[in-house]
Amino acid sequence: MLDFVICDDNSNALNRLEKLLESAFIARGLEAQIVLSTTEPGDLVNYIKHHSVNVVILDIDLKAKVTGLDLANLIRKQDKNVYIIFTTGHLEYGLIAYKYKTFDYLSKPVTIERLLDTIDRLVDDMFGDDTQFVRLDNNKTIIKQDGIQYIQKDGMKVIFHTDTRDYESYSSFKKILPQLPHQFVQCHKSYIVNTKKITDIDITNNSIFLNNNQDLKCYIGPKYKSQLMEVLNYGNIPNCVDSINNTK
């Protein structure tokens, strides 16, 4: 049984999150329970001191002298293994939150789809094979490899475009590529593609289309074209490409 604790200064938001969590537990057949749901930071701190929990979900802006970040700092000193998830209406807090080895942060208003994605990754991180995931930087945020469509370099940032959302990290392809299995191929100086997601390739326009969506694409650079085609033709990649347009 997994024990969850949640804290939000807004009672309406707290009640909504409780219902979403309970729905997520049922949807995933997860043996889990909310052992504490509170609007008072002091109640949370007191509970953590006397009980062991698995997951703490915190609002960052608690409209009090103590912030969610302060609570995370106290919790982390008490328990180095607890999973901390932040909820926030201010995405700029995201990078700061990772200082506390944050597993994830949920943008408000939290949706059931986004929460299910977090719960799935949480369960896999606790019980699954770690080689199936990519970790962002040195924190505990992980992305399931088979959910990545492509990875894009944008200045100092690297953006992971997945089936459910985009993740940003300050990293480099040099660090990321060794973590990835063979179906991920660098096809451009700014793109790494998951070849299992490719459904069409337009060689004439050096474009790769993914998941049968003509608006979802990345590009092929001259330097990487031969390598990409070699992998697609001889790399034992499943038959995921519906067509390759070689029209000249």
Image (tube, helix red, strand yellow):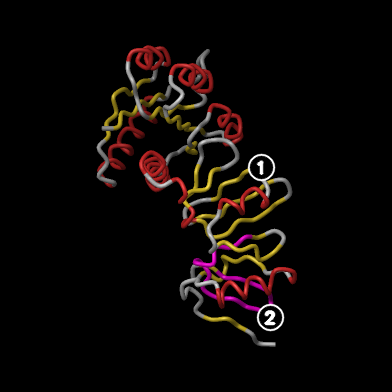
- Give, as a three-letter code, the residue at label 2: Thr
Q: Position of residue 121 (x, y in %)?
A: 41, 44
In the rendered view of the protein, which quadrant contains the N terminus? top left
Which one is in front, 188 or 177? 177
Identify the amino acid type marked 1.
Tyr
In magenta, the rendered stretch is 192-209
Element assignment for label 1: loop
Q: Check residue 206 for magenta coloring.
A: yes
Could you tell me which residue is drawn at 55 percent across and 35 percent down? 139
Residue at image point 70% right, 58% down: 190
Question: What main secondary structure does the magenta stretch of the protein show?
Answer: strand
How many numbered marks have been drawn onto this rendered protein structure?
2
**Gap in Å between the C-alphas at discs 1 and 2?**
33 Å
Q: Residues within 10 Å of mark 2 (few under 14, many from 20)?
A: few
Q: Position of residue 184 (x, y in %)?
A: 57, 61
In the rendered view, does 3 fall on the left or right side of 82?
left
Mark 1: give few (<14), some (14-19) or many (20+) Cα within 10 Å: few
User: Foreground: 50 or 14?
Assistant: 50
Secondary structure under tag 2 reads loop
Above or below residue 138? Residue 129 is: below
Q: Quadrant of residue 221?
A: bottom right
Residue 182 location (% of width, % of height): 54, 62
Can you identify the residue that label 1 sits on? 170
- Whether 126 is drawn above or below 84: the answer is below
Q: Which of the two marks, 1 or 2, is nearer to us in this view?
A: 1
Q: Residue furthest bottom?
A: 248
Q: Determine if the magenta segment contains residue 231.
A: no
Query: Could you tell me if the residues under marks 1 and 2 are in contact, i.e. CB atoms within 8 Å?
Result: no
Q: Is residue 24 above or below residue 82?
A: below
Picture coordinates of residue 123, whole percent (x, y)? 36, 42
> What residue is disc 2 on?
204
